[in-house]
Image (spheres, rainbow, N blue to C red):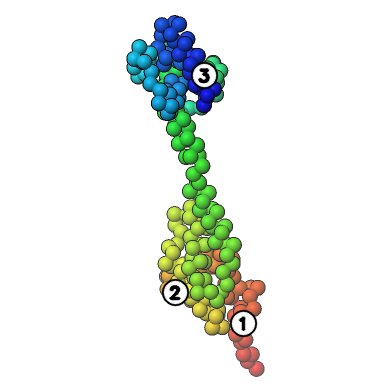
């Protein structure tokens, strides 16, 4: 703090020697007047009236001056465009851009915009979030005897088919998984047609629903539950 006060003292002496205001002298040196005046207030030091000046009027004049030299740059600063990008557009260095931001009194505005832009980039993309949620649900490996089996499998199916506008509703697939679970727990075997009775679906979509969540139909070519064809009696 002492070093800063000594720096302020030197700037004040410079202002006196040039018959200029403290704030305007700071601007000429490329320093932020708000920062130094805040330090003075914290120390209970008030500037003499002849060193005070309307900061807003200084900034307004400075903005007009900068805008004349670099048309459109103030708009880009207020939008929070990065220093390097602004510099690239006007063929000036990043340090020059920073100096312009300070001289025009737009530091606070620019920093807030930059922070908001950074926060918005950190937000998770909805599609990425849903894809991750789908992976998390699949990894649960909910057992068949779990009371949440129908709900989890229904959710897994809906997440897997989220982009399909013709995807079957949660309620209809829930009835399929609920009947599938009940039949399996009680040692029953239901055909695809039987599983599709309540949701009013034929065998083909029911088969797709089961396979979408890694469940095998109870009657398949590889299933031990495959119905055996009836033997025709031979006529002698």
Looking at the picture, tell me which residue is in the foreground, 143 or 158.
143
- In the rendered structure, find residue 228 and report the number of the disc placed on it: 1
Label 3 vs 1, first from the N-terminus = 3
Give the alpha-carbon distance from disc 2 to disc 3, as whole Å.
Answer: 87 Å
Dot 3 crowding, Cα within 10 Å, few <14, some 14–19, many 20+: few
Q: Residue at x 44, y 5 (%)?
A: 18
For the question of whether residue 106 can be seen, the reply is: no
Q: Is residue 1 above or below residue 69?
A: below
- Residue that numbered label 2 is attached to: 197
In what element is the residue under mark 2?
A: loop
- Location of the C terminus by quadrant is bottom right
Label 2 vs 1, first from the N-terminus = 2
Residue 137, how many percent across, how many down?
54, 61
- In the rendered structure, find residue 219 and report the number of the disc placed on it: none
Figure label count = 3
Left or right: residue 225 versus residue 22 is: right
Residue 167, how many percent across, how many down?
46, 59
Looking at the picture, tell me which residue is in the foreground, 124 or 203.
124
Dot 2 crowding, Cα within 10 Å, few <14, some 14–19, many 20+: some
Q: Is residue 24 above or below residue 203?
A: above
Residue 94, how many percent across, how many down?
55, 21
Q: Is residue 223 above or below residue 105?
A: below
In what element is the residue under mark 1?
A: loop
Give the alpha-carbon distance from disc 2 to disc 1, as whole Å.
Answer: 22 Å
Q: Residue at x 42, y 70 (%)?
A: 200
Q: Residue at x 54, y 53 (%)?
A: 131
Q: Nearer the viewer, mark 2 or mark 1?
A: 2
- In the rendered structure, find residue 6 and report the number of the disc placed on it: 3
Residue 29, how many percent across, how many down?
49, 14
Q: Nearer the viewer, mark 2 or mark 3?
A: 3
């Amino acid at each position: 703090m002492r070093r800063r006060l000594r720096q302020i003292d030197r700037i004040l002496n410079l202002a006196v020697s040039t018959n200029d205001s403290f704030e305007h002298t700071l601007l000429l040196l490329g320093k932020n007047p708000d920062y130094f005046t805040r330090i003075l207030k914290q120390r209970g030091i008030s500037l003499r009236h002849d060193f005070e000046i309307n900061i807003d009027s200084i900034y307004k004049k400075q903005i007009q001056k900068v805008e004349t030299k670099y048309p459109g740059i103030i708009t880009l600063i207020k939008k929070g465009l990065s220093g390097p990008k602004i510099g690239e557009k006007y063929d000036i260095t990043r340090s020059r851009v920073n100096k312009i931001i300070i001289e025009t009194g737009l530091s606070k505005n620019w920093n807030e915009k930059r922070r908001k832009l950074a926060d918005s980039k950190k937000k998770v993309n909805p599609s990425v979030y849903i894809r991750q949620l789908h992976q998390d649900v699949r990894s649960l490996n909910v057992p068949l005897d779990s009371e949440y089996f129908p709900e989890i499998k229904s959710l897994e199916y809906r997440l897997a088919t989220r982009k399909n506008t013709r995807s079957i509703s949660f309620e209809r697939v829930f009835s399929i998984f609920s009947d599938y679970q009940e039949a399996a727990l009680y040692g029953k075997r239901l055909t695809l047609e039987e599983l599709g009775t309540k949701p009013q679906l034929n065998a083909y979509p029911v088969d797709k629903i089961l396979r979408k969540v890694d469940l095998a139909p109870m009657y398949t070519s590889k299933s031990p539950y495959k119905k055996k064809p009836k033997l025709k009696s031979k006529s002698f």
